[in-house]
Image (tube, rainbow, N blue to C red):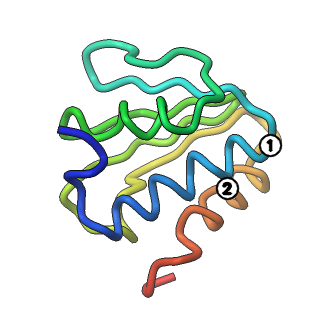
């Protein structure tokens, strides 16, 4: 499986999330629940190809971590996220950027 097998809404949110992190100059890692499939990458295509190979992924970048749960729909793809102390505003901004193109924002 890959992100191409996810629903269109999930693909949009996942792509927006990766783009939001990369725009901030962050290297991004993808963990599929068993192993880190991509480590500290800034290659958008590599990151997107690594997504949706399992039921969920964790995308980490800098002080941020986003848990993606597939099959819940685009606006619910990001099931949870975490951030370092003092990072709530930036984490919320990234989350909102990822959901900006969904209808239920």
Q: Quadrant of residue 21?
A: top right
Which of 57 and 89 lies nearest the eye of the viewer? 57
Cβ atoms at labels 2 and 1 below 8 Å apart? yes
Q: Quadrant of the N terminus?
A: top left
Assess disc 1: are there few (<14), some (14-19) or many (≥20) residues with their C-alpha within 10 Å of its C-alpha: few
Residue 12: image location, x then y, percent? 44, 64
Residue 94: image location, x then y, percent? 67, 55
Measure the C-alpha gap from mark 2 to mark 1: 10 Å
Q: Label for residue 71?
A: none
Mark 2 or 1, nearer chain start: 1
Residue 52: image location, x then y, percent? 27, 40
Q: Label for residue 24?
A: 1
Q: Is residue 40 left or right of residue 22?
A: left
Q: Secondary structure at mark 2?
A: helix
Q: How many marks do you count on the picture?
A: 2
Q: Is residue 60 left or right of residue 37?
A: right
Is 27 drawn above or below residue 23 in the view shown? above
Q: Secondary structure at mark 1?
A: loop
Q: Residue at x 76, y 47 (%)?
A: 23
Residue found at the very far front of the displayed protein = 45
Q: Residue at x 56, y 52 (%)?
A: 17
Q: Label for residue 94?
A: 2
> Mark 2 against mark 1, which lies toward the viewer?
1
Q: Residue at x 43, y 85 (%)?
A: 104
Which of 76 and 85 lies nearest the eye of the viewer? 76
Q: Is residue 101 left or right of residue 1?
A: right
Residue 29: image location, x then y, percent? 53, 24
Q: Quadrant of residue 73?
A: bottom left
Which of 81 and 54 lies nearest the eye of the viewer? 54
Q: Quadrant of residue 16?
A: bottom right
């Amino acid at each position: 499986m890959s992100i191409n097998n996810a629903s269109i809404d999930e693909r949009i949110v996942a792509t927006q999330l990766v783009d939001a992190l990369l725009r901030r100059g962050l290297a991004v890692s993808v963990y599929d629940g068993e192993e880190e499939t991509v480590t500290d990458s800034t290659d958008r295509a590599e990151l997107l190809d690594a997504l949706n190979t399992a039921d969920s992924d964790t995308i980490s970048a800098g002080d941020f971590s986003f848990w993606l749960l597939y099959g819940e729909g685009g606006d619910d793809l990001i099931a949870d996220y975490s951030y370092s102390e003092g990072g709530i505003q930036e984490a919320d901004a990234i989350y909102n950027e990822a959901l900006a193109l969904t209808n239920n924002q």
